[in-house]
Structures are given as structure tokens and as C-alpha cells.
Image (cartoon, rainbow, N blue to C red):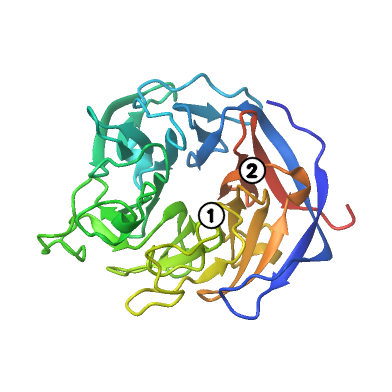
Amino acid sequence: MRWITPLIFTLGMTIAAAPSVAAEPAADARKVQVAVLVEGLENPWSLAFLPGTPAMLITERPGKLRLWQPGQKVSEPIEGTPEVYHHGQGGLFDVVLAPDFEQSRRIYLSYAEKGEGEEGAGTAVGFGRLSEDHRRLSDFKVIFRQRPKLSSGEHFGGRLAFDRQGMLYIALGENNRRPTAQQLNKHQGKIVRLTAAGEVPPDNPFVNDENARPEIWSYGIRNPQGLAVNPWTGDIWENEHGPRGGDEINIIARGANYGWPIATYGINYSGLKIPEAKGEIVEGTRQPAWFWQRSPAVSGMAFYDADRFGEWRHSVFIGALKQKVLLRMTLDGDKVTGEQRLLADRNERIRDVRVGPDGYVYVLTDESDGKLLKVGLATPGA
């Protein structure tokens, strides 16, 4: 771990004419500071701050969970994590703390898990108790397994979020099997909702439908890569990869259908139409809160509700893997009004973004030599 002299980058701001169309960014005079806190991480995927300290947990996709504290080296891998399916896009994914972590010390992990025999792989979620010395997870318990297991290494999803009521939301990809996102008897392409213990809440929308999986909260999702609770409304927001074009931000609602693959703003990678697509707007499906005609390959999501940088309040940060920028989406209520692009000069894939307890934005770069970055606005006159 080393701290470097902060670097200065120029930002750009775009205001779209409609909430689902992004224009090209234009430069302005604002600047940011970036400090590299950690180098040498192996494809880091997610981070979570421990309460009351600046320490954080960091996942690496090959299956390692580590602790980092300012002024210290990154820890050796924490013991007791589950075996992961590290193949293609698979591996260890998200890490979140239980809402009652200070009492329970529960850490939740999502990861890719190989099935038995000829089965494919799927996303699994479980929790363990973090030891006081941060060296091990004990009594790890799997509380959710995606069924059926269909992935050969693609579109796992895996983002986790707890809402204000302590319910756990899990974002699941469709494993690159498009039609499954519309099939309620499968977990593919769904947002599922569970209690913190992994039980099905009785008010889930499909609990009384014998042809549906009771864990499902909403459906029609392609490849979700960001999930976060809006601190001002309590709504769950999600972002996902489209195919060629059509990356989306969605505000997740009970029982709602977000369209994939029958409604999409994207096309196939071949340049041809998605075979199942009926158009961009299809009756019975929800429109995205925002979409990109050219896919940034969005990843990670964090609302900015801190006092440190007033210019950033009431916005949401999203990473971009393909376009290698940090996106700041400006908000008016629950409407996305524009897009600002940060860190373009770094040319690094951004996998995750979180707002720290100090009001700075923390970013993980998805590289074999991955980094933890601390991002903030430059002081006046700097």
C-alpha cells in the first residue's frame, strides 16, 4: 500500500434532453483529486466499510476476502470464505455487512457456485461471523442458491443490498440465457428478496403462485452490476449491462417486469436485432429511469449523501468497465437529469464505487493489478 501525490483531472457535464438519453460530455473547469491507496489487488470486485473505522473489506474475484486499514498493508486472505467458481465472469462478488453488524458481526458474500455433474454454475449468497481480529469468517451458511444452475461463466449478477426494513435484495443475471428473464419458474434475470436469515417474506409478489419462485421480487433483468438504496426515498436502484447498447438504470418495484429481452434499447453483438425483442417500449414492462445508447458497461452504484462535497449531493456514482470512467448521474427527485464523467484520463476499468464515512468516493479498478482509489474534489485554489 502506498499513498501518492493527488492527481488532477478535468471533468465533463452532460444534461440530456430526456431522462433516458445521454449526450456527449462537455468540459468544465471543476477538478478532482485522486489518491491511489492500494495497488496489486487481483480483480477486486467489491468493498464494504466497517462501522466506526476507516477500515474496509475488499473482495477479489478469484475468491479472496481481505481487510485494508489506512497505514497498513492489505491483510492476508480472511479464512472461512466459501469455495467459488472462478471461471469466465464467475468468482467472489459482493460483500455487505448485516444491518445489525455491530451486534451480530455477520458478513454477507455473493459468489459463483458450480453445480453438480452436468449442471452449470449459478449465483449463491451466504453469511458468516467475522472474528474480532478480522482474520476469519466462522459458521458460514448458504442462504440462497440460484435455481436452476445454467451459467457456463456469464451473467451472474451478484450485487446485494439491504433496504430500510432489513430485507436483503439479490440481483441475478440471466446467465446469457435470454428467455429465462421472463420465466418466473427460474431465478435467472431476477431481483430476489429475502429476510436477513434467508427466508421468503410473506409479502413477496409471487409467494402464492405455484408456477413461480417465491423469492422473486421483480424480473426482466439482463446482467445486473449495481444495486443500492436511494437514501432519500428508500427505493432500490439497479443498473445492468445491455447487449450492444441499452445499459440501464432501473428503480425496482414489487412484481415489476423490466422487459429483457422483449423490451430493450440494445441490439445483439452481431449487429442484428435481439430475436425476442418486440421494441423499445412494450406494454406490461417498465421503462428504465435512464439508458445509454452506447454501453459504458456500468458497474457498481453509490448514492452521494455526504456533506463534504456539496456539489456532489443528490447524485449517484456508477463505474464503467468498457468506457473506463466514473459516472456521476445528477438527480432531481427520482429523475436522472444528466451525466458527468470523471477519471477518464486514468484509462482503468471501474468495477465498484462506494461513498466512505469521510465523504470521499472510493473506487475499485478491475484489473489483474487492481487499485483502490480515493476520489474527492480539489480544494479551492489547488
Q: Position of residue 78 (x, y in %)?
A: 44, 23
Name the foreground residue: 53 vs 72: 72
Q: Position of residue 370 (x, y in %)?
A: 63, 32
Residue pictured at 66% horizontal, 76% vertical: 16
* Residue at which label 2 appears: 349
Amino acid type shown at disc 1: Ser
Residue pictured at 73% horizontal, 44% vertical: 347
Residue pictured at 46% horizontal, 67% vertical: 264
Amino acid type shown at disc 2: Arg
**Alpha-carbon distance for marks 1 and 2?**
24 Å
Question: Mark 1 against mark 2, which lies toward the viewer?
Answer: 1
The answer to whether residue 314 is above or below residue 115 is: below
The answer to whether residue 320 is above or below residue 132 is: below
- Residue 132 falls in image quadrant: top left
The circle drawn on residue 360 is none
Judge left or right: residue 204 versus residue 363.
left
Local crowd at mark 2 within 10 Å, few (<14), some, or many (≥20)?
A: many
Residue at the outermost right position = 381
The circle drawn on residue 270 is 1
Residue 21 seen in the current view: yes
The answer to whether residue 88 is above or below residue 342 is: above
Local crowd at mark 1 within 10 Å, few (<14), some, or many (≥20)?
A: few
Could you tell me which secondary element the residue under label 2 belongs to?
A: loop
Quadrant position of the N terminus in the picture: top right
Residue 166 seen in the current view: no
Could you tell me which secondary element the residue under label 1 belongs to?
A: loop
Q: Decide: marks 1, 2 in contact (CB < 8 A)?
A: no
- Residue 328 falls in image quadrant: bottom right
Q: Position of residue 226 (x, y in %)?
A: 48, 53
Name the foreground residue: 37 vs 266: 266
The answer to whether residue 124 is above or below residue 190 is: above
Q: Position of residue 106 (x, y in %)?
A: 34, 37
